[in-house]
């Protein structure tokens, strides 16, 4: 099934013609649970990985021998999904399932695993350029982007950051593919373990984060929004919908996507310049905890009209930070230069 973004609540360029000069596109990936293959673009699906190439690992020193087993996390998700289908997250549980959920939720220790033993990274996503119109070009004609991350928050100077590993490759050059990749015995955070999802890519129009627009244009948009909010506060109609907002309804869609503009709703906009050459970097992909929420409900696909955010807006099981989003940036001058990222 395709996923279709509803028309925007209004034509923002008709209100602010100057925005036309800043118009861009982004590809909403719309991951939904399924059974992708290794030659498909996917979230949490099997990677097209050469059998003779070492699987990516985290070699940074940190505790990695205590956590939850991936199989337990997936089984727990299955039980809750079945309970919802039977009549609600609590009333749908069978008599035996609460005790089973308690058992599945336990942490485990891996004996003998040191803080520096190679830790297999989790396969987060792979994107073929043929499927994703706004996926920026890879280096040297590569057509496949593969994204991995460590399942523990224990990296960097704060010892609480994430670790990403992005790989580009030419898919046609992969011979025998790895059938059963290694996986960590335990993970430090459930949100690092994605559910297998197929993608339904859709290209949509997007505009920059308001804080990055020219000052005069930004000020006019702010004044327009303030007038709408004042009118809503003075209204006596309890059924009147919330006023339309540039950030949540007209500029940057929520959810997983490729290309376009990054949102800076948690922090002030930060310069993302390439550390290898100084070029201003561009958004590569966004990894989001939710496909929509109460503030961004106007982006909910037409095919899912009427569905509540839980659980339908979180099909991947991925959680970034405090239910935020991860923006990964690439260097347009040389896509092979190291990536940078920001959590919002």
Image (cartoon, rainbow, N blue to C red):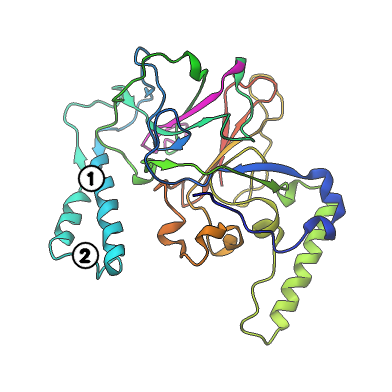
Callout 2: helix, strand or loop? loop
In the rendered image, which residue does mark 1 sit on? 72
Crowding near pointer 2: few (<14 within 10 Å), some, many (20+)?
A: many
Residues at discs 2 and 1 in contact (Cβ within 8 Å): no
Q: Is residue 59 left or right of residue 265?
A: left
The residue most toward the front is 1
Seen from the viewer's position, the closer of residues 115 and 170 is 170
Q: Which mark is residue 227?
A: none
Between discs 2 and 1, the one toward the N terminus: 1
Crowding near pointer 1: few (<14 within 10 Å), some, many (20+)?
A: some
Residue 174 place in picture, x, y as percent: 44, 15
Q: Is residue 150 magenta?
A: yes
Residue 294 place in picture, x, y as percent: 54, 64
Q: Residue at x 69, y 36 (%)?
A: 271
Real-space Cα separation, disc 2 to disc 1, in angstroms: 17 Å
Q: Residue at x 48, y 34 (%)?
A: 41
Q: Main secondary structure of the magenta part?
A: loop
Seen from the viewer's position, the closer of residues 174 and 54 is 174
Task: State the extent of the magenta-drawn residues as a range.
Answer: 141-159
Rendered view: 82 above or below 57: below
Q: Residue at x 60, y 57 (%)?
A: 299
Q: Is residue 261 visible?
A: no
What is the tally of numbered marks visible in this picture?
2
The residue most toward the bottom is 236
Quarter of image, res 342: top right
Q: Is residue 1 visible?
A: yes
Quarter of image, res 175: top left
Residue 62 place in picture, x, y as percent: 34, 30
Callout 1: helix, strand or loop? helix
Residue 83 place in picture, x, y as percent: 26, 62
In the rendered image, which residue does mark 2 sit on? 93
Q: Is residue 332 left or right of residue 157?
A: right
């Amino acid at each position: 099934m395709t996923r279709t973004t509803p028309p925007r609540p209004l034509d923002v360029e008709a209100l602010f013609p100057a925005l036309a000069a800043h118009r861009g596109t982004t590809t909403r990936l719309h991951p939904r649970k399924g059974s992708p293959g290794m030659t498909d673009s996917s979230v949490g699906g099997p990677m097209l990985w050469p059998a003779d190439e070492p699987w990516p690992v985290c070699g940074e020193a940190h505790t990695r021998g205590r956590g939850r087993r991936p199989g337990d996390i997936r089984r727990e998700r299955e039980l809750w999904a079945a309970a919802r289908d039977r009549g609600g997250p609590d009333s749908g549980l069978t008599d035996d399932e609460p005790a089973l959920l308690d058992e599945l939720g336990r942490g485990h220790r891996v004996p003998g695993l040191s803080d520096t033993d190679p830790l297999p990274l989790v396969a987060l996503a792979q994107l073929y350029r043929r499927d994703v119109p706004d996926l920026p070009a890879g280096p040297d004609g590569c057509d496949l982007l593969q994204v991995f991350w460590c399942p523990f928050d224990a990296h960097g100077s704060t010892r609480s950051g994430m670790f990403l590993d992005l790989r580009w490759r030419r898919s046609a050059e992969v011979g025998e593919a790895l059938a059963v990749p290694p996986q960590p015995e335990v993970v430090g955070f459930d949100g690092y373990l994605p559910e297998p999802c197929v993608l339904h890519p859709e290209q949509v129009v997007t505009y920059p984060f308001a804080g990055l627009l020219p000052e005069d244009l930004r000020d006019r948009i702010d004044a327009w929004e303030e007038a709408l909010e004042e009118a809503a506060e003075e209204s006596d109609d309890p059924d009147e919908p919330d006023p339309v907002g540039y950030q949540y309804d007209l500029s940057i869609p929520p959810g997983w996507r490729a290309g376009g503009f990054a949102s800076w709703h948690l922090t002030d906009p930060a310069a993302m310049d390439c550390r290898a050459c100084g070029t201003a970097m561009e958004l590569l992909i966004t990894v989001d905890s939710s496909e929509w929420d109460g503030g961004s409900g106007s982006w909910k696909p037409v095919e899912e009209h009427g569905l509540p955010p839980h659980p339908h807006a979180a099909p991947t099981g991925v959680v970034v930070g405090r239910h935020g989003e991860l923006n990964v940036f690439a260097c347009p001058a040389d896509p092979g230069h190291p990536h940078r990222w920001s959590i919002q």
